[in-house]
Image (cartoon, rainbow, N blue to C red):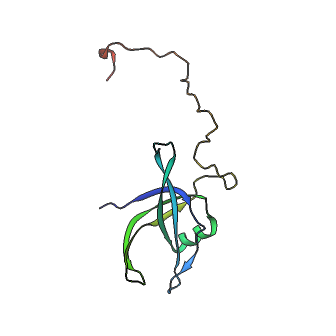
Amino acid sequence: MINKVILMGRLVADPELKRTANDVAVVSTRIAVDRDFKSANGERQADFIDIVCWRERAEFVSRYFRKGNMIAVVGSLQSRQYETKDGQKRTVIEVVCDQVSFTGEKANNGGGFAPRQDAPAPEFTAPGGDDFEEVDDDSQLPF
């Protein structure tokens, strides 16, 4: 069976390092991951996904990441149930992180991998200009 999740998004809050009763470091936080498409009114939507990091990864995230920072995570999807104080049963689905990394975003500019909206799209020109030969007959193709 395969259970692999790869996400890149922005932290929606500062990660808070906590420790279990056995002194194991843990960070539970949420990231906003943009969808690949825009809504009918032209707005980009995002999904908010819970992530959990344990031990050294938890310490790494709490030390180097803050709200708004872009983060890349690789992990597995996990679901768990619990009961609230008033007896309500809840289910949580979260990504348990196996790997956490920077995205290459510069810390001071907030640019990340998203293209600037005010920059024109780059044009592509083939090397050598227009010296491609059109082939009319499939029999001339080498494959």
Left or right: residue 93 versus residue 28 is: left
Q: Nearer the viewer, residue 87 or 129?
A: 87
- Residue that sits furthest to the bottom in the current view: 21
Q: Nearer the viewer, residue 126 or 114?
A: 114
Q: Is 57 situated above or below 47?
A: below
- Which quadrant: the C terminus? top left
Question: Residue at left 55%, top 27%?
Answer: 124
- Which quadrant: the N terminus? bottom left
- Residue that sits furthest to the top in the current view: 136
Question: Residue at left 62%, top 42%?
Answer: 116
Give the image location of residue 54, x and y in percent.
50, 73
Left or right: residue 122 versus residue 47 is: right
Give the image location of residue 107, x and y in percent.
67, 56
- Residue that sits furthest to the right in the current view: 108
Question: Residue at left 60%, top 52%?
Answer: 104
Question: Residue at left 33%, top 21%?
Answer: 142
Q: Is 133 situated above or below 127?
A: above
Q: Nearer the viewer, residue 98 or 39?
A: 39
Give the image location of residue 36, x and y in percent.
46, 46
Q: Is 112 situated above or below 64?
A: above
Q: Number of marks in the image?
A: 0
Q: Is 71 situated above or below 126?
A: below
Q: Nearer the viewer, residue 83 or 87?
A: 87
Q: Quadrant of residue 59?
A: bottom right
